Image (cartoon, helix red, strand yellow):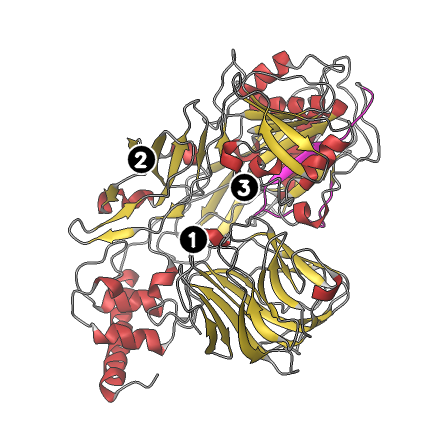
Amino acid sequence: MFCSKKTILNVTTLIFVMVCTIFALGLSDASADNQPPVADAGLPRYASVNPVTLDGTGSYDPDNSGPLSYSWRQVGFPSLTIADANTATPTISGFTQIGEIQNFKFELVVSDDSNDSLPDIAIVKVVPFFGLSSLVLENASFDLKKPTIIYFGGGDCVNGFAGQPWNGGPDWMSRANIIGFPSGYTRDSGASTYYKYGDMIIAYLSSVAPDYRQAIQTSGWSTGGQPAIDVAVRLNLMYRDARYAVNRVTFLDATPYCRDYSESIRSFLASSVDGEQCWIDNYVGATTVFHPSVLNVASSLSHPDVPAWYLNSLTGSDMNQFNNGVVAGAYWSVVGPGKNLQLASTPDAQIYNFRWNGGASSGNMSFYNESLYPGRLPEPVKLLDPVYIEDSRGYLLTCEESENAVSYELLIGCDPYRVMDYEVISDTLTPPNEVITPCFFELRWWTVRVRNKYGASIYADPKSIEPSLGILDLHKNGKMDFRDFAVLAQYWSQNELSVDFAPAPFGDGKVDIRDFAVMANYWLADLGIFAHWRLDETAGSVAKDSAGDKNGTVYGNPLWQPTGGAINGALEFDGVNDYVSTGFVLNPATGSFSVFAWTKGGAPNQVIISQTNGAIWLGADSSDGKLLTRLKDATPWIPALVSDFVITDGDWHQVGFVWDGTRRHLYADDEEVATDSSNLGKLVSYNGGLYIGAGPGLSATSFWSGLIDDVRIYDREVKP
């Protein structure tokens, strides 16, 4: 696109005005009175005998009048050792565990050379003595952005056997932190409980995730059901800290021979922390024992096949479909599409009793007895993009209809991780029809929670009320550049809603310097990118997602090429068994999206990007190596979309797939090379993770032989 002289002049003038404005603001700030700094000693910490590093980096000076100095001291006795007490992050050591929780206080004062802050207190809780820690993280490292699954294997009804890891493979490991006890476990001294493992776990989590914001699920097979629920009760009732609370427990053939779980279940269901409802799912084999207030699933599986079935349910094509609300397994786990489910307590009734018909890897789910147990679970909520209503100068916030829902609550709050605190804006029988105006904007986050007729609820992950960065992409090429400013200049001083961004969230009815400043803040930035694997690493088994928390795990032995990519580095695949696996990223059925990647090499029938047990997003056809996609709607006769552009000629090519909500588009080297001639229905739904460099089933002929670089996904339509 070429800019006219008038457009260039407008953009140049806007830059000059912006610089002058920022300079003036800077002068006015400099004249403000010096204010005292504010100390922030950090969140409470939990410890065993290992040293703890406190965190005062949240301290700040409101007027930035000078660098901060730090001073820590212990308040009370017995005395402990403080190393680096004049830094933001001192280390505390000398802890001794006893038979109860001990509280230690540490005071922080910060100074900007002119003023001292008021003191702030950090608390370190030393947990009761639990002996040597037998906890093992099965991942290479703990990921703060992933939920956590804590697993206890089987045993002899008293002690846990050694050598029983989770064994979930890359699909589970890429989605969650997995904590296990492969050397076994024992009861608390002189008791039939396993509470000490709750103490062990909270001390560990506090050391690796002081401000953990993700869900935690405990799970136990056979004897392991006892420590699984005891740990949850201990964490919720003893510590009552939302960072480390457990709101779901999974029984994997936790038979009644080891314990009558009735009281344990009642205690756990009543242990809600900050209003986050607790619930249990129970999977049984030959011995059918159902519980009230629990999701119960019977089967004819053998005792060891029950946990195997649960692991397989994450990716099994006939295990993770919604099935009109008759679904269980990983679908409702902390890594599944139904992760935000909460069952209502029904202490006198069994509502959700299902039956798995099949083996550990295939079959189907049905009612156990629909006439007696008719409960269907609510469908996960799909939020729709906000719609601006000009007359109200507000946004319509709503969702798609959710199967089995009888009520819809529009919720607004200030923390995306604490939906339990959100304000209920409306409660209706159908999806919300509420227009949100600026008076609610301070709360910033919104979602919709639905309930079924039995009180079970589920909500969507909250979204920001602020318009996404995608709306700044006026040229729709995924990046902030002069082409976007050229569009802005065309509407300067006009009342044009599409480019009136500021003040957030609704603008002020005029395109002016404030809108320019918003855009300038993102100069050359990737706008609204959903996931981005640059593949610029130099070594290791992790392909980092620079846009979020969807890191990939590298399998086989692909070679990092730090200087051999189309953009910096790339990853070279051998065409035999090399690939990258990610957790769940995006369901093609939810709406428009785009995916782009740079490739070099490859051969016919090989795959660039696919979805686990799903479809090929981008690949080469089997005859000539032409760019194709096999994403399609449910119509049987709709074929793959195949272009005439050969991508396996040994040269670098940027390839892309765009779904605009009605038609598929393929791009190669910035040009559209194929599109549908007529509109399609909604794309087929898939909930698996992604494979980079391999097909959906990891078939031998699908592995890519060549280089892949800079894989980008947008949850909207983007054109190169």
For the C terminus, the quadrant is bottom left
Q: Is residue 507 above or below residue 164?
A: below
- Marks 3 and 2, the one that precedes in the sequence: 3
Name the residue carrying label 1.
112
Query: What's the CA distance linking mark 3 and mark 1?
Result: 27 Å
**Residue sitting nearer the eye, 355 or 2:** 355
**Residue sitting nearer the eye, 252 or 188:** 252
Q: Is residue 243 above or below residue 499?
A: above
The percent position of residue 218, horizontal first and vertical second, equals 64, 31
The percent position of residue 535, horizontal first and vertical second, equals 62, 67
The percent position of residue 349, horizontal first and vertical second, equals 52, 14
Mark 3 and mark 2 residues within 8 Å of each other at the beta carbon = no
Residue 430 numbered tag: 2
Mark 3 and mark 1 residues within 8 Å of each other at the beta carbon = no
Tell me which amino acid carries mark 1. Asp
Tell me which amino acid carries mark 2. Thr
Query: What's the CA distance linking mark 1 and mark 2?
Result: 55 Å
Mark 1 and mark 2 residues within 8 Å of each other at the beta carbon = no
Q: Is residue 593 visible?
A: yes
Residue plotted at (22% across, 76% down): 490
What residue range appears in magenta?
137-156
The percent position of residue 368, horizontal first and vertical second, equals 60, 22
- Marks 1 and 2, the one that precedes in the sequence: 1
Query: What's the CA distance linking mark 3 and mark 2?
Result: 37 Å
- Give yes or no for residue 680 being in the magenta stretch: no
Magenta: main secondary structure equals loop
